[in-house]
Image (spheres, rainbow, N blue to C red):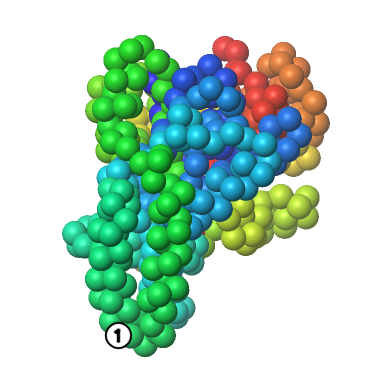
Amino acid sequence: MNTLVIGSQWGDEGKGKVIDFLTETADCVVRGQGGSNAGHTVIANGEKYVLHLIPSGILWSGKLNVIGNGVVINPGYLVEEITMLRNRGISITPENLVISDRAHVTLPIHREIDAAQEEALGDQKIGTTKQGIGPTYADKARRLGIRMADFVDRDRLLKVLQDRVKTANAELIRLGWAAVDPKETIDTVMEAADVLRPHITNTIPLVNNAIKAGKDLLFEGAQGAMLDIDFGTYPFVTSSNTSAGGCCTGSGVAPTRIDKIIGVCKAYTTRVGAGPFATEDDEISDYLHGLGREFGATTGRARRCGWADGVVLRYSSMFNGFDEMAMTNVDGLDEMKTIKICTGYELNGEIIIYPPALIEEWDQCVPIYEEIEGWQADTTSCTTWAEIPEKCKAYIKRFGEIIDCPVGSIGVGPDREQTIFVER
Ligand code: GDP
Ligand code: IMO
Ligand code: MG
């Protein structure tokens, strides 16, 4: 059984937790896109881990974790993440962590270009994670990127780096930004390359042969559907295809090999960074921040919060082909008296049920809400569907109807164990 797990909103839906939970019965976890802009939280055995580049299956022993061809890798950060995990007693070897030789490399210089571009945008800035993601994917599309395959031969890597740092520095100077020290940049990457080299391989036959051998694979999406460069709130998006299709491309696995696609959503909505967010709401935002919730795993920024958005979720269920939703953070609504869910937007006097393309139109969309009575009871100690309050069950059922996709499981807390399957 091969399962894709994709963020259905603007990221941070709880993909790390869902992947970790599903890894118990899987053989292999594959990341297909994004880079260190991702921050996937896993709480296992009372310990919190935030993973940026390494698949969230790494905490289970005996599983193969693959960083696929569609991922962009900052080598220094990947080495830091490996070291952090090793220091916490997690074994990382070329047997349980492999890196695609086709994956592109984020250089320290890409981070500088990201920051320079953001600054140049002034009020219009995207609010990127400043991890150099956009500039790395831009290099990939411009066909001048460096790939992990370039790491295999040391002399070749040195030459490739010298050339690229020279041209990238010229770009930085054009942006009015200071050039980076070539030696420092090159040394950092060369050092990281020595650690990563044993893990680099052609992951495409590896993953496909595992499928052929009847293994169970999990594909871990990063970011969320509305940050997808094609389907999201462009230009307030990331620079990869975060959707199910992007996950296939980024893993080297054909869509015909996928058996199930799970969308991860929160019981409400959050977003970090700038861009449209029709159901953003001060009441729920203040409430969640007051509980100490919804601060970013990668940047620590307070996430913008709002009600569940049926327009966004209906749309993302459609283009991702979700079989079911894994709804997390249901416990975040435990104390709410009334819960709102958006069923459509009013735009220029008309009701629309799918999002518009233009940012100007997004900004004019007025959400139409349905109000649902809150359950006002603690769900965090529930361990079975039978224990879930009836009003909470009613919210989950109605949610599934509005977004045209059933909810298959819910999260009632951040721990591995706080996952409950929905019974119908
Ligand atoms: P990801 O990027 O999709 O993996 O999500 P993040 O890790 O960035 O953010 C999700 C946050 O919600 C993390 O702090 C998780 O520990 C937390 N979380 C996930 N599921 C639940 C849940 O059901 N309840 C609660 N209270 N927290 C959850
Ligand atoms: P996970 O995998 C939430 C957002 C940034 C910004 C936009 C572009 O943890 O869900 P980028 O650095 O990618 O160029 O920034 O995308 N963003 C995320 N928001 N979760 C993420 O990842 C994100 N990755 C990028 O905040 O708005
Ligand atoms: Mg995250």
Judge whether residue 90 can be spotted in this image. Answer: yes
Q: Residue at image x 76%, y 52%?
A: 292
Badge 1 element = helix
Q: Where residue 318 appears, x then y in whole percent?
A: 34, 34
151 vs 331, nearest the viewer? 151
Q: Residue at image x 41%, y 61%?
A: 189
Horizontal arrangement in the rendering, residue 223 relative to residue 173 (left or right)? right
Q: Quadrant of the C terminus?
A: top right
Q: Residue furthest toward the left? A: 143
Q: Residue furthest toward the front? A: 155
Disc 1 within 8 angstroms of ligand 2 (CB): no
Q: Quadrant of the N terminus?
A: top left
Q: Where residue 283 appears, x then y in whole percent?
A: 70, 55
Q: Quadrant of residue 108?
A: bottom left
398 vs 57, nearest the viewer? 57
Q: Where residue 158 appears, x then y in whole percent?
A: 30, 64
The amino acid sitting under disc 1 is Arg
201 vs 332, nearest the viewer? 201
Horizontal arrangement in the rendering, residue 309 relative to residue 143 (left or right)? right
Q: Residue at image x 61%, y 55%?
A: 296
**Numbered marks: total:** 1
Q: Where residue 199 appears, x then y in whole percent?
A: 41, 40
Horizontal arrangement in the rendering, residue 148 relative to residue 404 (left or right)? left
Q: Residue at image x 33%, y 26%?
A: 207
Q: Quadrant of residue 49?
A: top right
Horizontal arrangement in the rendering, residue 12 relative to residue 377 (left or right)? left
As drawn, 298 above or below 174: above
As drawn, 311 above or below 260: below
313 vs 209, nearest the viewer? 209
Judge whether residue 277 can be spotted in this image. Answer: no
As drawn, 182 above or below 387: below
Residue located beneath label 1 in the image:
174
